[in-house]
Amino acid sequence: MSESRTGALAAAGLIPAIGYIRVSMMLEEKISPAIQRDSIESYAARRGYYIPPGMWPEGGWIEDLDVSGRTFQRKIMHAIAQVEKGTTKAILVWKYSRFGRNRTGNQLNLARVEAAGGELISSTEEVDARTAVGKLTRGVLMEIAAFESDRAGESWADAYQNRVARGLPPYGRAYFGYIRRGRMPHPLSPTHTLRDPSDGEERYEPDMESGAAEMHAELYETWVVDQNFASLARELNRRGFRTSGGLLWSAETVLQLMDRGFAAGLIRIHDPECACRRPSRCLRKVFRPGAHDALISSELWAKYQAFRAGKVIRRVRSVHHYVSFITCWHCDGGMHLKQESASFFCGSRARHDEEVCGSRHVPLRAVDEAVLGVLRGWAPEIEAAAAAVTVEPAQREKDVRRLTKELERVAADLDHQTILLTRRLIPEDSYLRTRDALLAEQQGFRESLRQLEVDSEEARISHRAARQVMDGLVAEWPSLGVLERRSLLMQVIERVSVEKPSYEQAWLWIYPTFEGGAKRVRLGGKAQMDRVIELVVQMLADAGGRSLGAGELRVSAGASSPTFNRAMRDLVSLGVVAREGAGPITRYMLLKPMSAQPTLDAVKTEIVRALVEMRGEMLGARELRMRVGATLPTFGRAVMVLAAEGVLAREGKGKLSRYRLVKRLRPGEHSERL
């Protein structure tokens, strides 16, 4: 939608709406986002709705790609929240099935939308939900969507059990060291395959020709000697082997490959006795005999398992504990860890994309502190959350009352239709259609009531299990290895996202795996250093000329050792405090009061003035900062802004940084700036 057109629609006072697009995980349901968007835009133009251009939160479009409709842990919740806030009046979807395929979730969240005065509209299934017939039609369409989801789930479960019974891995895929036979690529989807009648039944055969089978067996023989996954990854890459996705091997991917046990002639599946609702994340796995040939002996596999059970592994520097679930809040891309600075930065910068994300780096240490802080805060909250599932009756009783009333209404409608038939006021075929629709609606409400009880119990168990993991993770964090931390974090944290819109501000979004909202935590950085400087100066001033120990100051300021040390170096260089001693006996004493710090604009002005006086010569960063009289954080921000504006150039890094003026100023411009 063009800007001129949206501006005209907004000026016409049309109904504000959000366009929601969801692409299913099922192949037959993968409807292009472009098709859905075109249909929604066409409907909005015809019916007088206005969808702001662009993606949410700046615009009015929300997309969930390759996301199942069985859960409402999706971006659709942002749209529902906007309706409840009153900023939008409608949610437009391509079909009602895009909203969701969960009966309980559909009814509860649709009730939230309508209670807030909003409406859910399908661009291809035009029904007037303000009428009784319209509500019935919409309910039938949603029931059909839920039925299709149930049918697909049953088919998948049957296929899962069939594959396990035949000794095949439950998820058909390529396995390193083996060639998958009996399958051919799907012509419509590169990630799917079809049965190849010319190649017999599906099976896995050792890949002896490329040497992958021999290499796979060698991994176990080597690891039981030195327990080093990183060296195995380097050897695989050196010999030219790649993962099934065509990527280089890492210590993490080698560990996953070997723990799977496929080379021992086994298939690993989720424990059938486990009642959790997240089998893909659950750690309860069991092994079953596979139909493929083993590459290693059962004795070697048992030895490997014994070592792994004893956690005899080396820490791997190349793998951090947020691999695969730390993302950039601005572009949803992955974050990369820069080893030299121990900081995360957006993957768009790592790939040198043409359009680089506007985010900036954040230290790994700051992310760790934020995550541990949230885990400590969650621990006492989580018992209350678990209790609220059963003890807090407000929302649940409200839902029960609403569903009970709906059941009473459906029963009354059935009685009314029966009376109309007996009086011969409606034909029998019309009665049968209405009766079947009402019975389906009645069954849906009964299922929703039953599901409320099930969800209540499962949510309580989920919360308590998460509490146990959190307690152990926080207590044992310093002694855990990278891979152990990651394994435990993934049980309680779905993902973390870094939000850093400017140099001075940074937040971390932490999304839990259990029921609950995301936490947004301010990360430490330059702003934190300013706060530490202010607290330290105040404490030294209150000491009345006495010196205070470094440890006492750091603990009272609530700062980490790196942040505290940088702050004290800054104060010493400005001549505000004096340092006595070294190491654990270091003490500091106030020499003069801390003068009011100049603003960022004032520091920029003084930097330009100092460089103008140098007449094109270089000036060291330390000397330049001393002339300006600014703290290190403010000075750093000022030179960064001036460099971005092309006013100055920098040579060297760190303490060796030097600056010079590069932008010629017209007569009068310098005095105007100053």
Image: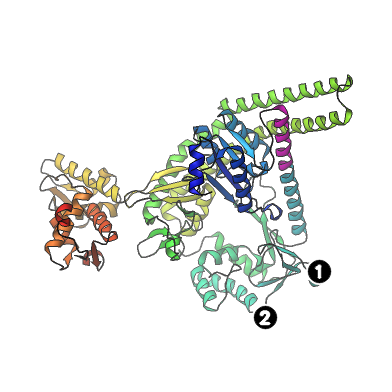
Secondary structure, magenta segment, majority class: helix
Q: Secondary structure at mark 2?
A: loop
Q: At which x and y percent is residue 102?
A: 67, 40
**Circle 2 residue:** 209
Q: At which x and y percent is residue 398?
A: 61, 25
- The colour scheme of the drawn protein is rainbow
Location of residue 213 by image quarter: bottom right
Q: Is residue 219 visible?
A: yes
Q: At which x and y percent is residue 473?
A: 47, 49
- Residue 82 in the image: above or below residue 62: above
Identify the residue at horizontal 75%, vertical 30% (top origin). 442
Identify the residue at horizontal 89%, vertical 21% (top origin). 424
Viewer-side residue, 126 vs 524? 126
Which numbered disc, 2 or 1, marks the residue closer to the eye?
Answer: 1
Viewer-side residue, 251 vs 665? 665
Location of residue 211 by image quarter: bottom right
- Residue 250 in the image: above or below residue 157: below
Question: What's drawn in magenta, residue-wise?
Answer: 130-146
**Circle 1 residue:** 197
For badge 1, the amino acid type reads Pro
* Left or right placement of residue 21 versus residue 534 in this view: right
Identify the residue at horizontal 25%, vertical 53% (top origin). 633
